[in-house]
Image: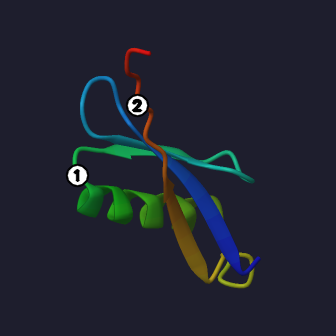
């Protein structure tokens, strides 16, 4: 696997939640910088060997915006 993609959303409680699209990996953090470290750590824990671990991590930020019509 060359790349793993995470959907990142703002949490209702504050901070961010990241969910991998193709693997069962979910993590959260208060800031974007903390989230990057938490995602990297979660990926390293999920994939036992370096050969299986993706070379790149992509964070795709999703933001819902609701407004009156």
Provide the secondary structure element on which disc 1 rests: loop
Query: What residue is rendered at 65% in x and 67% in y?
Result: 4
- Colouring of the image: rainbow
Quadrant in the picture for residue 41: bottom left
Q: Is residue 48 visible?
A: no
| Residue ID for mark 1 | 31
Query: What residue is rendered at 55% in x and 68% in y?
Result: 58
Q: Is residue 30 visible?
A: yes
Q: Is residue 13 above or below residue 35?
A: above
Side (left or right) of 59 relative to 21: left
Q: In the image, residue 53 lies at what x, y percent?
A: 66, 75
Side (left or right) of 20 relative to 63: right
Quadrant in the picture for residue 19: top right
Farthest-out residue, front: 69
Q: In the image, residue 8 lies at what x, y percent?
A: 47, 48
| Residue ID for mark 2 | 65
- Camera-nearest residue between 57 and 61: 61
Q: In the image, residue 37 lies at what x, y percent?
A: 34, 65
Q: Is residue 17 above or below residue 21?
A: above
Query: What residue is rendered at 62% in x and 62% in y?
Result: 5
């Amino acid at each position: 696997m060359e790349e793993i993609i995470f959907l990142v959303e703002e949490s209702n409680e504050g901070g961010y939640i990241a969910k991998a699209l193709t693997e069962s990996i979910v993590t959260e953090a208060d800031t974007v910088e903390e989230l990057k470290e938490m995602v990297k750590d979660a990926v390293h824990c999920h994939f036992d060997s370096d050969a299986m671990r993706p070379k790149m991590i992509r964070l795709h930020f999703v933001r819902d915006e609701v407004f009156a019509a």
